[in-house]
Image (cartoon, rainbow, N blue to C red):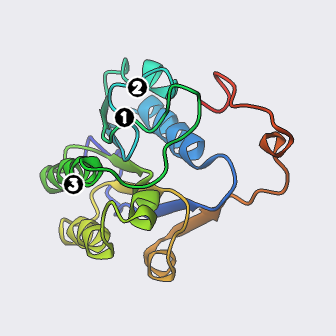
């Protein structure tokens, strides 16, 4: 029995997508559950600046956990006035490629029972990574025997990704207080 997964069954491909709140939260909740079960977890965050711990509060606890390896990639998108920078600037794609390389290494070495690629789908939607990049990660995961649970999050999952996945959850926005002008709140949105 593999001590990283606590099971001999192959891992599953999870996709958390949609325009609603909760995609990253669902993945981090899964990491917390897996950690409690003794699994080793790799979390690679795409397009979430490594130097910005003020906007990604989940890092503060997850980075302290012995069985979780946390790697953040991306350039800062939070502007001084509290708004978000859209569009791609030099360096954004390089950071996304760094995240892909970390994911590939972890899948190849098989040291983790769970690999979370947070915002990888959004990175695809923004053009930070290509469809072939994401397909190569999934193909490698399959070739290596699906030794881990593979979790992908982000808006805009494409039809091929939905078809590839074993589990797809779409977060659908029905109503959001942002639409009334409420700003992001610490501990809730970040």
Q: Position of residue 164 (x, y in %)?
A: 43, 77
Quadrant of the image occupied by residue 87: bottom left
Q: Are marks 2 and 3 in contact (CB under 8 Å)?
A: no
Image quarter hosting the C terminus: top right
Q: Position of residue 61 (x, y in %)?
A: 46, 19
Residue plotted at (14% across, 56% down): 108
Figure check: 190 above or below 146: above
Figure check: 1 above or below 164: above
* Upstream in sequence: badge 3 or badge 1: 1
Q: Which residue is disc 3 drawn over?
A: 97
Of the pair 42 and 172, the residue shown nearer to us: 172
Figure check: 64 above or below 50: above
Residue plotted at (45% across, 66% down): 125
Residue 1, visible in the rendered structure: no
* Upstream in sequence: badge 2 or badge 3: 2
Q: Which residue is disc 2 drawn over?
A: 52
Q: Which residue is disc 1 drawn over?
A: 49
Residue plotted at (49% across, 43% down): 85
Quadrant of the image occupied by residue 128: bottom left
Measured Cα–Cα span from mark 2 to mark 3: 19 Å
Residue plotted at (36% across, 23% down): 63
Of the pair 82 and 12, the residue shown nearer to us: 82
How would you rate the neighbour count of disc 3 (Cα within 10 Å): few for under 14, some for 14-19, many for 20 or more?
Answer: some
Q: Are marks 1 and 2 in contact (CB under 8 Å)?
A: yes
How would you rate the neighbour count of disc 2 (Cα within 10 Å): few for under 14, some for 14-19, many for 20 or more?
Answer: some
Of the pair 42 and 83, the residue shown nearer to us: 83
Q: Are marks 3 and 1 in contact (CB under 8 Å)?
A: no
Q: Position of residue 35 (x, y in %)?
A: 42, 32
Measured Cα–Cα span from mark 3 to mark 1: 14 Å
Callout 3: SS: helix
């Amino acid at each position: 029995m593999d001590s990283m997964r606590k099971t001999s069954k192959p891992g599953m491909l999870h996709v958390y997508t949609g325009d609603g709140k909760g995609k990253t939260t669902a993945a981090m909740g899964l990491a917390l559950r897996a950690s409690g079960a003794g699994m080793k977890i790799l979390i690679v965050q795409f397009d979430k600046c490594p130097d910005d711990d003020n906007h990604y509060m989940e890092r503060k606890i997850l980075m302290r956990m012995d069985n979780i390896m946390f790697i953040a990639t991306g350039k800062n998108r939070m502007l001084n006035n509290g708004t978000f920078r859209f569009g791609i600037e030099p360096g954004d794609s390089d950071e996304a490629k760094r995240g892909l390389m970390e994911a590939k290494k972890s899948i190849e070495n098989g040291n983790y029972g769970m690999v979370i690629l947070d915002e990888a789908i959004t990175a695809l939607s923004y053009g930070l990574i290509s469809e072939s990049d994401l397909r190569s990660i999934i193909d490698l995961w399959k070739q290596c025997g699906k030794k881990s649970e593979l979790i992908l999050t982000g808006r805009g999952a494409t039809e091929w990704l939905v078809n590839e996945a074993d589990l797809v959850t779409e977060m659908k926005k029905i109503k959001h207080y942002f639409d009334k002008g409420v700003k992001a709140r610490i501990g809730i949105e970040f």
